[in-house]
Amino acid sequence: MFTFVRKLFKALNSSGKTWQLSLAIVLAMFVGFLPSNSLILLDLLFIALLLNINFGLFLLFSVVFGGLGYLFDPLFESIGYSVLTHDGLNGLFTSLYNSAMFRWSSFNYTLVTGSLVVSSVLSIPMYFILNVLIKTYRVQFAQKLNEWKLTRWMNLFNEEVTSTSIFRWWALSVYAGVIGVFIIFFLLLFDPLARLSLEKGLSYTLQSEVNIDDFNSDFSDLKVLISGIEFSDKDKLTHNILEVKSIGFDLSFAALVEKKLMIENLKIDGVAFDTLRQSPANAYTSSTSSDEKTKEEVSSTQKSKSISSPFTLPNVDDILNKETLSSISEAKQLKADIASVEKKWKKVSDELKASTEVDEIKADALALQKSLKGANLKSILSAKGDIDALRTKIK
């Protein structure tokens, strides 16, 4: 907070003209209200560098208006929706949307249009009001503040502005240099890097060597031509499983403006299968070491166990186990009780004698009983061995 106040007062007390400060704050309002992914911000940044405004104040208030814009985003979206759906503007917006350059601005998003409308409405009155406020401050308050020891110690005054011209001409040279670097990159390095990246990506995906003779791009017409594509057979390195003489296609500029990739006029020439290579292909080897492969396999196995495939239905039991339903817990308890009863009866059944053995015991008991009826004492004493044998069978 202290740094913010110090920079604000240093800008207000500088020798710069009032329009340099007011215009910096107005441009910062446009930047702060717009969403951060809007490409219009690049245009505003170019204007802020080209115009000789107080760039520090511009950056400072961009942050301030960014916070305010976040709070008022619902209002901006409502205003943008009302503007974009207005019946009288349908024809205008349709023609603008059919233009790739205007579509690049993402004006068809309600938040972008709403913030632009609000910023445009507020910009002119804010500019003149800020001019009046800054002049009033410098005339009535700045001289008195300069007499305070605290403000002198904070060094809030006497900041000289080196130039008060309208434009920063060096900004044009900076932009020209940046554009030159991009042009050199796309002219000299883009095609070789694209060819190398395509070879590496296809080789990694197919787990076999892929060779591309030439990659040629034309950004003026947005055309791409890939020549001499060979997909080696990993089981027979002397042959190509597929060979394509050339693949050519056009890119849609309108789609690129919307950060999309749309291929037009695709042409494939010279497709051949199982062709002999001029030289045997190298066996594909990944740069990953065996230890790293083992770790990856273990982690992938663990993930496969914990994460089900999107193409397979989940197991019903797994779903029910995750739920805390009383019916499920009662069913589990009932299953446990049934298993306990079955175990108990099985134990009793194992301890019981076979049915034939029980019949034999009954027959022996009846025979012994008949033999003892009306017997004398000597006969009864002699039957003691038969009684002991019967007891043994019963046990």
Image (spheres, rainbow, N blue to C red):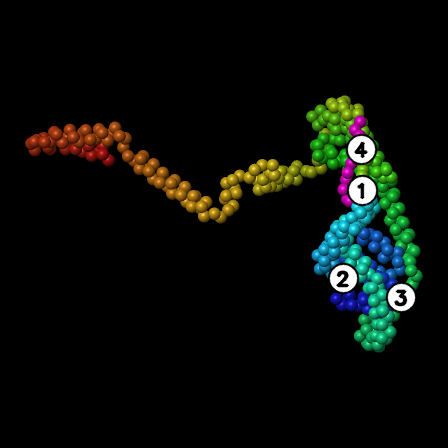
Q: Where is residue 31 in the image (x, y as percent from the top left)?
A: 79, 57
Tell which tag, 3 or 1, sits nearer the viewer.
1
Q: Position of residue 209 (x, y in %)?
A: 74, 31
Lower sequence index among marks 3 and 1? 3
- What residue sits right under mark 4 in the picture? 265
Distance, label 3 to label 1, CA atoms, is 43 Å
Q: What element carries label 4?
A: strand
The span picked out in magenta is 254-269
| 236 vs 362, nearest the viewer | 362
Lower sequence index among marks 4 and 1? 1
- Label 3, residues with CA under 10 Å away: few <14, some 14-19, many ≥20: some
- What residue sits right under mark 3 in the picture? 17
From what the image shows, is residue 7 above or below residue 290? below
- Label 4, residues with CA under 10 Å away: few <14, some 14-19, many ≥20: few
Residue in the picture at 34% in, 36% down: 346
Lower sequence index among marks 1 and 2? 2
Residue in the picture at 28% in, 30% down: 354
Tell which tag, 3 or 4, sits nearer the viewer.
4
- What residue sits right under mark 1 in the picture? 254
